[in-house]
Amino acid sequence: MKVWQFSEQAYHPAFDVPGSMRVTLPSRHCDPAVASTLLNRYLDEYMLADELGYNIMVNEHHAAATCMSTSCMTTLAILARQTRNARLLALGIPIANRSNPIRVAEEIAMVDVLSGGRLEVGMVKGAAYEVFMSNRQPARFNERFWEAHELIVEALRNTGDNFSWDSESYQYRAISLWPRPLQQPTPPIWMTSSSAFSSIEHAKYDYTCATFLSGAVARSVFDGYRKAYLEAHGRPAPDKRLAYLGVVAVAADRKTAYERAEHMKGYFTTAARLDAQFRNPPGFNPVKANVKMMQAGPNAVRPRLRNGAPLPSDATIDQYIDAGLMFVGTPEEVFRQLEQFYSDVGGFGNLLMMGQAGTLSHEDTVDNLTLFAKQVMPRLEELSMDAPEVRYEAFA
Amino acid sequence: MTTEASAADFLQAAKVVEIQGLKLELVVKGQGAPLLLLHGMDGVEGCARIIDLLARDFTVYAPSHPGFGASELPRAFSTIDDLAYFYLDLLDHFDLQNVTVVGFSLGGWIAAEILVKDASRVSRLVLGAPLGLRTAERRKSQVTDLFTLDPKEVDATLQVTPASKSNLAALPEAVLERIARNAEAVTLFGWSPYLYNPKLHLRLHRIKAPTVLLWGEDDRLAPLDYANSFVAKLKQARLETLPGCGHRIYVDSPDAAAARIVSFRSAQ
């Protein structure tokens, strides 16, 4: 099991501002001096993660107090120089929100070269509300995503002559990446999924498929991926192609771990603060999906507890653990929770670990990362790569 | 026409016609001179009442725009221009002459885009609170942004008449699908620039047909000020305001609007 440290790099002092944390939150609530301290602190924690044997994941959001990383590749350009061993994962770049996919390819190639070939690239659709900041057309978003993906991959892998490009949304006269990526034909590519259906394409492309904080839904995502993978490639999907993102709070004693978890819970309670009109702009999702959402009401998209009930919005730490969103306790307890979850979802090879979230302090984050790296990470080796073929014979 | 049941009844009369390979949902109603009615953002069902009123004096052709209701949306369609050219094909298809074109809101924008291209089959134009001219300039916006509006405010912004509260989850799937398609089509055609064509103001002078511009005095989406930009460009237009009426003229003042349209035709 590979473990990736991840923080959304929140501007948590704004959590006290009433109302939405995204899209509409005025930037006057951001003190840039405080932002400077926090962003540098988060980078320090990423550097510590590198020393402790973690890999690194960064993301991006826009107009949000919950995430100050507004560009995956800017953050990774720094870490490319300041880390030594970690794989560097951008998860991800919202390519259908970018106006210039070739600029995206250039940044990928540059960071890959800078890092000595340690870059991994997530191309993501991103959250629906991000279109309010990019202002790109929400309708036909999915089509534009695949169009941008095709162009970026063509640019990254090109070893022949320069080429021109003309597709519905993108036209270029001369495409030529200087530098071109170190990893050939491209850095490893990741995508995200929250349903069995959306993981099918990822499997066909042999891309790593990550699912975020989805609890029991991870099972159907991974099953869908494995089924499609076997059909497309004639061999079972390796665990290393599957990734799960969860929040981890570990401490020498249970009480301290739960206190840390309470601070990290701030991620969930603030991430959800968004005015209704921004949640699902018309056209972003297919008509059929929108009809289902109207029929099911707002609870349909909430993660579930093991008994099937939706996770309450004011859930306790134990409920977050039960839903598979948080792993909390002593090193032994956290290992057991991860082991159980691993078995529940049929295995995965990458733990995308929020080792910092919400208002968790630097000192607590350092201890959290250190303890996990020393006492949990080595034991995760037992879980992965255990030749899972037997379980998937049914698909053959 | 506010209840779902009556919308369903109204749509019973709709048929599907194929024009240039596009399957179009079309209501044809009434007798008399031809009138092409172009609906607003809430679909042709929103105009059911005024269609019934106009059908007393006209043969009303009321399509669901491509992408709305049950009308197909060709993959290549992405702008109001595409709809305008398509409606020119529709006029050819039925070989209509001396048509009165009536468009409300988004449909008013489409109507204007049709006439700047080819008005040869059109004798009169009625624009009911049309969109299509610049809705914002730098930091100042003239037309309320529906995409960023609290959902609870949308109906109150669009109409004076209190909207019937319907429980979405309880509606038939076919109705929900129309709601979702209508919203998606508005996004496709109106997301950005927000509900306008930056070139239209250069072309409006081409409209020579006698034009009446109807505007609700209580339009909270596109206030009367916005009407003036149309008046300035449409030399033949007469602005008539409707008291106690919001943006959805066809909801707030269908009788008054229908009467104005009928008298506009009789007057010339």
Image: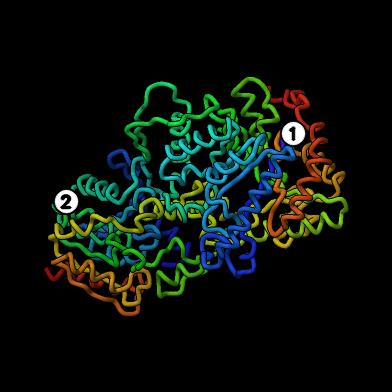
Would you say residue B258 is visible in this rendering?
no
Along the line of sight, the residue nearer the viewer: B240 or A138? A138
Left or right, A342 with reference to B110:
right
Tag 2 residue = B118
Query: Relative to A41, is A348 above or below?
Result: above
The quadrant in which the N terminus of chain B is found is: bottom left
What's the amino acid at mark 2?
Asp
Residue shown at 41%/64% (left/top)?
Answer: B145
Foreground residue among B161 and A93 = A93
Q: Quadrant of the C terminus of chain B?
A: bottom left
Q: Closer to the camera, A63 or A393?
A: A63
Residue B139 is drawn in which quadrant?
Answer: bottom left
Where does residue A61 sit, x and y in percent of width and height?
55, 52
Task: Quickly name the residue at label 1.
Answer: A1
* Chain ID at mark 1: A
Is A35 rendered above or below residue B227? above
Residue in the image at 78% along x and 59% along y: A316
Q: In whole angstroms, how far apart are the C-alphas of marks 1 and 2?
A: 66 Å
